[in-house]
Image (tube, rainbow, N blue to C red):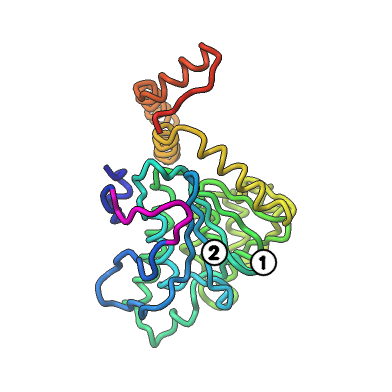
């Protein structure tokens, strides 16, 4: 059964387009948006997806357009994240990009007056759905960043559960420089870094280095470019080796308690611990520890 957040965002039931290890998702496979308004013309999917050993890799693959989060890119990314989200074979997702730019944010050619407010609304609605989907997804989602991430591209990094970047990466919300304040990127940014840091980025549009981003909490870690894939894969393999039900329960509880006052947060977290102990994997982990052996997870 789909997690509540996924049901709200349109997840399908079990058996949805099952694929073999590292098989790409079918061309044209895309989640349905609002019917009619501003739908991009059919064409090559702007993302590439592979999966192996529980790790799904989603690659933004439009480097000529600086991996802009066009409506087509957003819908393709949404589709790839939702694909078999309930499958117990999926343990972790990595989002990365081809080329020197992780993502430059929204495609400004889609935000002109000629497109109209209905199209603009669909772009931002779809983008918001993707960002919320990352948080509501049952498995951890990792951003692997090698290069520039600006505006909604920075928002995508801030929305992921874990973010690993090369030391050549940089981050910015420069919309204010072209008269378009990065209000929606500010939602994710303001939840990832201290308020004054977020507002300086939003008010000035000036870039932040990877080291600064790590210092302020936008990133989990920074490594040399040549070690980026290795380190990201190491984290992903560690996550994939753990119990999916336990991680799903813990991820949902973590985000749920963040918005609560301290007493309510502890109440929710305490109940989650009780629920965790009721899971088969919760008891298996304790037994394995006491018996000094490796646990055998249910999935």
Residue depicted at x 49% and y 79%: 108
Point 28% across, 47% down: residue: 14
In front of the other: 210 or 43: 43
Label 1 sits on a secondary structure element that is loop
- The quadrant the N terminus occupies is top left
Name of the residue lying farthest toward the bottom? 114
- Picture layout, residue 63 above or below residue 95: below
Q: Is residue 54 magenta?
A: no
Depth check, front residue: 103 or 56: 56
Residue 210 coordinates in the image, percent (x, y) = 69, 55
Q: Is residue 260 visible?
A: no
Left or right: 102 with respect to 52? right
User: How far from the left and from the top, in percent, is residue 95?
Assistant: 53, 56
Using the rendered image of the protein, determine whether residue 6 is visible from the camera's viewpoint.
yes
Q: Position of residue 6 (x, y in %)?
A: 32, 49
Q: Can you identify the residue that label 1 sits on? A: 206
Please name whichever residue, 206 or 88, is drawn nearer the observer in this view of the structure: 88
- Answer whether labels 1 and 2 touch (C-beta < 8 Å): no
Report the magenta stretch's main SS. loop
Task: Give the residues in magenta.
Answer: 15-24
């Amino acid at each position: 059964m789909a997690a509540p957040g996924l049901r709200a965002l349109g997840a399908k039931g079990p058996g949805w387009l099952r694929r073999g290890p590292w098989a790409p998702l079918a061309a044209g496979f895309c989640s349905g948006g609002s019917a009619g308004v501003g739908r991009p013309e059919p064409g090559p999917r702007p993302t590439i997806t592979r999966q192996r050993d529980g790790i799904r890799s989603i690659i933004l693959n439009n480097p000529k357009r600086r991996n802009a989060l066009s409506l087509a890119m957003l819908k393709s990314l949404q589709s790839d994240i939702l694909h078999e989200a309930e499958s117990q074979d999926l343990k972790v997702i990595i989002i990365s990009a081809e080329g020197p730019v992780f993502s430059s944010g929204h495609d400004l050619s889609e935000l002109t007056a000629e497109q109209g407010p209905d199209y603009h609304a669909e772009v931002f609605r779809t983008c918001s759905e993707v960002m919320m989907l990352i948080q509501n997804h049952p498995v951890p989602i990792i951003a692997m960043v090698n290069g520039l991430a600006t505006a909604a591209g920075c928002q995508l990094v801030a929305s992921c559960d874990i973010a690993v970047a090369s030391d050549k990466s940089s981050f910015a919300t420069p919309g204010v420089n072209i008269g378009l304040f990065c209000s929606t990127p500010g939602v994710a940014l303001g939840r990832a870094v201290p308020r004054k840091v977020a507002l300086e980025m939003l008010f000035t549009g000036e870039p932040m280095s990877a080291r600064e981003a790590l210092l302020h909490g936008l990133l989990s870690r920074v490594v040399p470019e040549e070690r980026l894939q290795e380190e990201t894969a190491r984290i992903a393999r560690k996550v994939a080796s753990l119990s999916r039900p336990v991680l799903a329960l813990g991820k949902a509880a973590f985000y749920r308690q963040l918005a609560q006052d301290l007493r309510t947060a502890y109440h929710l977290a305490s109940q989650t611990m009780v629920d965790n102990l009721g899971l088969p994997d919760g008891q298996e982990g304790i037994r394995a520890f006491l018996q000094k052996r490796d646990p055998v997870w249910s999935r």
